[in-house]
Amino acid sequence: MKDNIRNFSIIAHIDHGKTTLTDRLLEITKTVDPRLMHERFLDSHPISQERGVTIKLAPVRMNYNYKGVDYILNLIDTPGHIDFSYEVSRSLAGCEGAVLLVDATQGIQAQTLANFRLAKNLDLTIIPVVNKVDLSNAQPEKVAQELIDSLGFSADEIIFVSAKTGENVAEVCQKVIERVSSPLGEEEKPLRALVFDSFYHLHKGVVVYLRVVDGEIDLKLKKEQKLRFLGSGGIFQPLEVGYLAPQPRQQIKLKNGEVGYLATGLKDISLCQVGDTITLDKAKNVEPLPGYREPQPVVFFDFYPVENKDFPLLADALEQLKLNDFALNYNSTGSPALGKGFRVGFLGVFHGLITQERLERDFNLDIVITSPSVEYKITLQDNSEKIIYNASQLPDMAQVKEVKEPWVKISIFTPIGYLGNIFELCQQKRAHLQNQVYYGEYVNLEFAMPLIELIEGFYDELKSVSSGFASLDYEMMDFKAFKATKLEVFINKQNIEALSMIVATNKGELRAKSLAKKLKEVIPSQQFEVPIQVALNNRIVARETIKALRKDVTAKLYGGDQTRKDKLLKKQKKGKKRLKQIGRIAIPQEAFMAVLEAK
């Protein structure tokens, strides 16, 4: 049976049609009843459906008859957005092959290259597919030549398809069967299964998605066949095994080479680490399977409930989300202006915004999130080190010897005509060119850049200066020292810690003035005059004033001399002065995100 199994993924840049191709494969293999079929079938979450972005990998088993032989095709659907690239590595770890999908109207882009390299490093068989050949502006021959010249494919390897119409999609199944090898591993060896995802089920406990490499899991033997996670040491008896088609189909066994799910019954999801190896508890000297690095958060948001009484509800909601989002981690924090909340770590800004939307929609919470921040390493004058996540944690600069910030290596794929604009933008963002490689009319640029510059609107600016043609991918590097300044924001003379930030000294004043102007635009007017002040290292360098709303208190007068009006205006002025002393400013969500737009 193992010889008739093919495990593969589809990898592509975002919006190149990966999910549409998956839908056609489900139809061609008759995996889903035509009456139940709908667009983006494997993107079960409403946010994925609405945004058109896959945010969670999803395995599915398909049956396909080719030349009279029945084959099992295990497809692990992958996300396309760069913030979820860790999910791609999880998918590829369980496969022998990958379909590299390229848009016939867009050609090779940044994530096309990044995913190609990832699959190549794992020694997977890669099948190149040019999609959207039905569109009037498609250039399939040109894109095919890019694949030949840039990535080393031969012309007869490339498949031309239209995932929308279904043209040549059956050929993709056939090439997967012909070119991708059957799974390695031996049934006689002790059980070894790679965990590539997990979620929490109320009745079944932790449920893992896994790829069985050696041996088998047999429910008939579950009483005497206790299983163990090699990494965490968690021991359990399997409750249920099966595969997804795409709904769970319960089985008695999962054999080597198969991809499926396993209900562990465990209530503690921390015992199940993605990338861990499951084996028999009684097995000795079992080598763990090569997994992949745990996802490390690189961007941090502070989440606060609008109403302080909702703090316990937010805590419960984050705990539940953590059960299904392995990359999420959080710690409690607090702010004098916003009350109690949580500092939450994400893989990118988009990951954070998706999580906010899930909290608000799935758990009916109203949340304020602060502008994103990153991790900084501080060396004090006594040579002790500490890690901080925002400016409010920064000690007095007189006590600080050195501040280090995280850097990333970014890869920009762009038409040559936009090189000048992109170099100018990257120079503004403190980036350093490391390499450039030409691919015909396109060039791939590699820069080293501070992570904070990347997350503060760089992607939108890149799209703007390249008319939308440039694409972006990034990976983490190390920490580098820089000259840092603490920027603080005072609204109505109250220090709003959640708006504080650490900025490069040479950009401090420009950033302060831009932020003050932006806050003036987004904070609503009050019944009293509201000053906005921005300070660098305790020195005010920028100020804007939000004018008070003025009610015409003299409108009710129908006669009399000027002294009557003056009396009412003086009374109004006195009231506004008192209101200014006791009034509190309701800071809208837009104020916190204004930090991203301040240049």
Image (tube, rainbow, N blue to C red):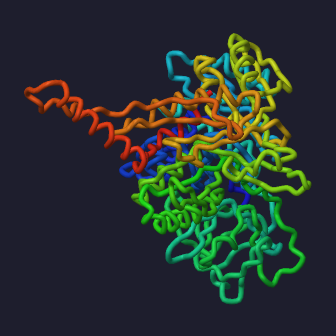
**Left or right, 337 with reference to 345:** left
Residue at the far top in the pictured view: 417
499 or 80, which is in the foreground? 499
Near-viewer residue (455 or 597): 597
Would you identify the image quadrant in which residue 335 lies? bottom right
Left or right: residue 595 versus residue 415 is left
Q: Residue at x 77, y 23 (%)?
A: 444
> Residue at horizontal 91%, vertical 54%?
383
Place of residue 455 in the rendered image (x, y in percent of width and height, measured from the top left): 65, 37
> Does the rendering let one see residue 381?
yes
Residue 556 on image: x %, y %: 12, 33
Image x and y of residue 568, in percent = 22, 35
Q: Is residue 517 above or below residue 535?
A: above
Q: Residue at x 69, y 70 (%)?
A: 272
Quadrant that contains the N terminus = bottom right
- The reply to whether residue 175 is in sight is no
- On the image, which quarter does residue 553 sit in? top left
Q: Nearer the viewer, residue 138 or 399?
A: 399
In the image: residue 42, left or right of residue 289: left
Residue 185 position (above or below residue 124): below
> How far from the left and from the top, in percent, is residue 403?
82, 44
